[in-house]
Image (cartoon, grey):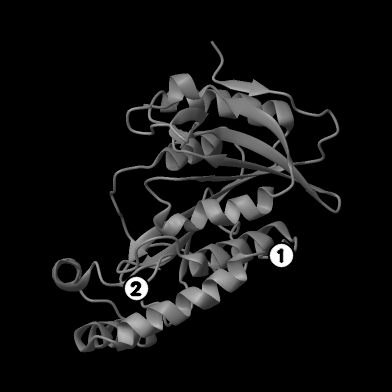
């Protein structure tokens, strides 16, 4: 039984496929927010069998009750949307990270990429990091071969890093092995920020625009980022220890220096234990 139901048009011209999934590498909802801007107004050309891919006890549908009557259910979804920017076809796959059958899904996506003539794969992600909200959002890149990343984004981190993989990375590896050029852009989100982080979403949208050579407007993300910065500045200034902590992160970024792994982990854990619930992202500061 196929995991993907496709209704693709026959006039696609060298389409690129951009992917962002919520969950493991979507800190501050930055990756999915950027992808949704790229997909905005596009036509859905493929949907996924979510009954097979999702654990509904982990992703329970949202029930709307009006005046004591159960009205609607909203289910988590996963889809591919086609957007046209000038002569460019950009397909955007976004939604919830699947819980099951990752390897089977990878194989079907490889087959779909071959069928649609996908010329490049772009992953978007966001990860919590020891960076301050007062500096530009750092972007790390991954690529299936040298020379694919655009702008000033560098591949990283250097050396060998072993981490629990996200579904998007499993798909990326499968696509790369099939011969499709693949890159990833990953925003670093201040680990002390809770909730949506529009600033990182903007940075990822800009990275995608540069890579795809399009100009997708930021829409509401721009104003959300301004309001968020104001809230975070106010919350930081109201507490001296938080202010000192952010200043320490600023100095490390300005000096292009990070503490050693054990020191960094201990520092983050201490901050989260003492102050971690005092700064909000999309919501109001406590």
When the figure is inspected, residue 189 is found, relative to residue 238, above or below; the finding is: above
Report x, y in % for residue 271.
Answer: 18, 72
Mark 1: few/some/many CA within 10 Å (<14, 14-19, 20+) = some
The answer to whether residue 239 shows anywhere in this view is yes
Report x, y in % for residue 58.
Answer: 33, 33
The image quadrant that residue 197 belongs to is: bottom left
The answer to whether residue 256 shows anywhere in this view is no
Residue at the spot 19% in from the left edge and 67% down from the top edge: 272
Residue at the spot 56% in from the left edge and 42% down from the top edge: 94
The image quadrant that residue 158 belongs to is: bottom left
Residue under label 2, please give it.
285
When the figure is inspected, residue 170 is found, relative to residue 232, above or below; the finding is: above
Residue under label 1, please give it.
217
Report x, y in % for residue 237.
Answer: 32, 88
Query: In this view of the protein, which residue sits in the foreground, 274 or 206?
Result: 274
- Residue 103 as seen in the image, left or right of residue 224: left
Quarter of the picture holding the C terminus = bottom left
Q: Distance between the residues labelled 2 and 1?
A: 28 Å
Tell me the element at label 1.
loop
Dot 2 or dot 1: first in sequence order is 1
Tell me the element at label 2.
loop
Numbered circle sitting on residue 81? none
Query: In this view of the protein, which residue sits in the foreground, 52 or 251?
Result: 52
């Amino acid at each position: 039984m196929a995991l993907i139901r496709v209704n693709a048009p026959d006039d696609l011209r060298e389409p690129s496929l951009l992917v962002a999934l919520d969950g493991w590498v979507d800190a501050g909802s930055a990756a999915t927010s950027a992808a949704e801007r790229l997909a905005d107004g596009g036509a859905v050309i493929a949907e996924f069998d979510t009954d097979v891919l999702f654990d509904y006890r982990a992703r329970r549908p949202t029930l709307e009750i009006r005046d004591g009557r159960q009205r609607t259910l909203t289910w988590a979804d996963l889809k591919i949307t086609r957007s046209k920017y000038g002569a460019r076809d950009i397909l955007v796959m976004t939604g919830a990270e699947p819980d099951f059958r990752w390897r089977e899904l990878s194989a079907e996506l490889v087959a779909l990429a071959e069928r649609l003539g996908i010329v490049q794969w772009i992953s978007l992600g966001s990860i919590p990091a020891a960076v301050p909200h007062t500096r530009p959002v750092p972007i790390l890149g991954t690529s299936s071969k040298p020379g694919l990343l655009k702008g000033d984004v560098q591949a990283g981190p250097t050396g060998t890093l072993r981490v629990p993989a996200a579904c998007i990375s499993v798909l990326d590896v499968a696509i790369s092995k099939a011969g499709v050029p693949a890159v990833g852009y990953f925003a670093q989100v201040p680990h002390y920020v809770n909730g949506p982080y529009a600033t990182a979403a903007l940075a990822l949208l800009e990275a995608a625009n540069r890579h795809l050579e399009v100009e997708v407007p930021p829409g509401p993300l721009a104003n959300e980022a301004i309001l968020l910065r104001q809230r975070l500045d106010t919350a930081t200034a109201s507490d001296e220890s938080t202010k000192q902590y952010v200043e320490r992160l600023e100095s490390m970024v300005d000096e292009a220096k990070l503490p050693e792994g054990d020191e960094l982990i201990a520092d983050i854990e201490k901050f989260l234990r003492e102050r971690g619930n005092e700064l909000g992202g999309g919501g109001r500061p406590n």
